[in-house]
Image (cartoon, grey):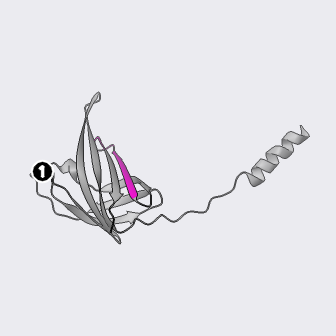
């Protein structure tokens, strides 16, 4: 019993190390290319997934995207520890698919040469998965 109490006390003192908040890994400026997978949920028992080729440019705290599928998007972003918040500041016309506007919070996985962004948009019943690779400068 004495050893159990000592063991629990040691776990409490040394095992509960408080992590200091980490600053987010910066997103490298440059041109990225990759895929956007958009899953739109239809009702409660079906979904449709579409794959798009997408190009992104990140510069400081701004971003720009261009594809052959819809009007371009651009705006600012906030880089958080485990997420990125895109704010689209482009005026879009009403004659295209508004589900393709990239805006809001995305979970991110930031590596030295790639960036993965994932958004589960519960309000609009869609899931976005974007896998980007940094192009050589």
Image quadrant where one finds the N terminus: top right
Relative placement, left or right, of 75 versus 5 is left
Residue at (12%, 50%) from the top-left corner? Answer: 96
Farthest residue toward the front? 136
Q: How many marks?
A: 1
Dot 1 falls on a residue whose secondary structure is loop
Q: Position of residue 102 (x, y in %)?
A: 26, 55
Task: Tell me the quarter of the image containing the C terminus.
Answer: bottom left
Q: Residue at x 41, y 64 (%)?
A: 79
Q: Which residues are magenta?
A: 114-127
Instruction: Depth check: give the residue in front, 100 or 123.
Output: 100
Q: Nearer the viewer, residue 110 or 18?
A: 110
Instruction: From this view, report whether residue 28 is shown above or below residue 129.
Output: below
Q: Position of residue 9 (x, y in %)?
A: 81, 48
Q: Is residue 123 visible?
A: yes
- In reply to whether residue 84 is colored magenta, the answer given is no
Q: Which residue is mark 1?
A: 96
In this view, the residue in front, 31 or 59, is: 31
Residue 28 is drawn in which quadrant? bottom left
The crowd level at tag 1 (other Cα within 10 Å; few <14, some 14-19, many 20+) is few
């Amino acid at each position: 019993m004495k050893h159990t109490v000592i063991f629990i006390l040691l776990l409490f003192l040394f095992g509960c190390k408080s992590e200091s908040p980490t600053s987010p890994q910066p997103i490298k400026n440059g041109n990225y290319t990759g895929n956007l997978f958009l899953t739109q949920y239809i009702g409660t028992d079906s979904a449709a997934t579409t794959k798009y080729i997408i190009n992104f440019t990140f510069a400081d705290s701004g971003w720009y995207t261009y594809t052959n599928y819809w009007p371009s998007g651009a705006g600012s972003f906030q880089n958080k520890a485990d997420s990125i918040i895109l704010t689209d500041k482009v005026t879009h016309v009403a004659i295209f698919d508004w589900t393709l506007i990239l805006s809001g919070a995305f979970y991110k996985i930031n590596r030295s040469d790639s960036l993965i962004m994932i958004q589960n948009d519960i309000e609009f019943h869609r899931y976005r998965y974007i896998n980007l690779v940094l192009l050589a400068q």
